[in-house]
Image: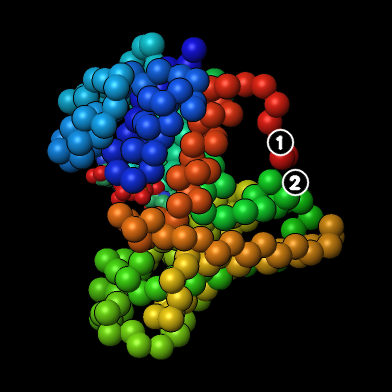
Amino acid sequence: MKRVALLGCGYIGTQLALAVDSGRIPARLERVYDASEEAARVLVSKLDSKPQITENPHLLSYPPVDIVAEAASQGAVREVALSVLQNRRDLMVMSVGAFMDEAVREVLEEACVDYQARIYLPSGAAGGLDAISAARREIEHISITTTKNPASLRGAPHFEMEGMDADSITERTILYSGGAAEAVRRFPANANVAGAVSMAAGREAEVVVVADPDTKSNTHTIRVRGGFGSMEFKTNNVPEPSNPRTSRLAALSAVRTLYNYCAGGVKTGS
Ligand SMILES: NC(=O)c1ccc[n+]([C@@H]2O[C@H](COP(=O)([O-])OP(=O)(O)OC[C@H]3O[C@@H](n4cnc5c(N)ncnc54)[C@H](O)[C@@H]3O)[C@@H](O)[C@H]2O)c1
């Protein structure tokens, strides 16, 4: 049975832990860590099988853990991912935006080779990454438009950078148009899909971020064209009430990726 450690005990981390605890994912949750000890304690209190709360995130990847599942932040990926790989553990990353930093991406890709470890990037809140990945050598253009209610974008550094207030947006407004790398800096908790899409395509996607006070969903529209033809994927996601920045689908995707890692068997999609 695979052994799992969890970095980040918020909404997605809790869904992962509950899926393991209930047996839906055939694994054992060994350890958890969160920068907020309270978040870690609250999570553990919900579980029948109690994992250890580690004192620091680097202890997560000590034996007998097989995989560390990150569901924390881009900063956590920068701080912890390399040491996980150096300990020859696999890593699942939800804060995919971290990979838009070329230096981070290169170091982690090299570490995977050097230490024979693997990094899993779930599709998260979007669909179509399997097809985009299959077509990557023939892609000529790829874009993603993300539309969210201003409440779901609240707190993004973009607003401070532009001297704006998310709560003052009263009509559909294009907040950002540009590359994925800058998008994940301006919207670290909202533009992970742009990072995942770019990683699947092997090139930086063009990103548009829209605030729409009339929408209740988190919508991602991905358009791809190239020698293979063209594709369009639209996902209308329900935001998670406890954390409206995150879509329910992102947690479902995290659970499915960890399930595939732990359960083996037939895996659908390229
Ligand atoms: N790939 C995707 O499509 C996708 C979709 C939604 C969310 N995400 C990302 O997944 C991550 C988790 O999302 P969530 O909804 O569970 O968030 P959340 O805010 O509910 O929980 C995050 C938890 O991580 C902890 N944390 C933050 N930085 C940390 C650090 N450096 N070290 C340790 N703990 C830290 C916080 O204290 C919090 O408890 C976020 O980075 C989010 O942006 C990705």
Q: Quadrant of residue 261?
A: top right
Look at mark 1 in the image and give the residue it sits on.
268
Instruction: Please determine whether, in this image, residue 206 is positioned above or below residue 200.
Output: below
Residue appearing at x 30%, y 44% in the figure: 10
Q: Is residue 142 visible?
A: no
Q: Is residue 23 visible?
A: yes
Ranked by sequence position, the earlier of labels 2 and 1 is 2
Instruction: Please determine whether, in this image, residue 214 is positioned above or below residue 254.
Output: below
Q: Mark 1: which secondary structure?
A: loop
Quadrant the C terminus occupies: top right
Q: Position of residue 195 (x, y in %)?
A: 51, 54
For badge 1, the amino acid type reads Thr
Numbered circle sitting on residue 134? 2
Q: Mark 2: which secondary structure?
A: helix
Q: Position of residue 266 (x, y in %)?
A: 70, 26
Residue appearing at x 49%, y 40% in the figure: 254
- Label 2 beta carbon within 8 A of ligand 1: no
Q: Residue furthest left?
A: 38
Nearest-to-viewer mark from 2 and 1 = 1
- Label 1 beta carbon within 8 A of ligand 1: no
Numbered circle sitting on residue 210? none
- The colouring scheme, among rainbow, by chain, secondary structure or one colour, is rainbow
Look at the numbered discs 2 and 1 and tell me whether their residues touch, using CB distance below 8 Å. Answer: no
Q: Position of residue 92 (x, y in %)?
A: 47, 34
Answer few, some or many: residues within 10 Å of disc 2's Cα (few below 14, many 20 plus, some between 14 and 19). Answer: some
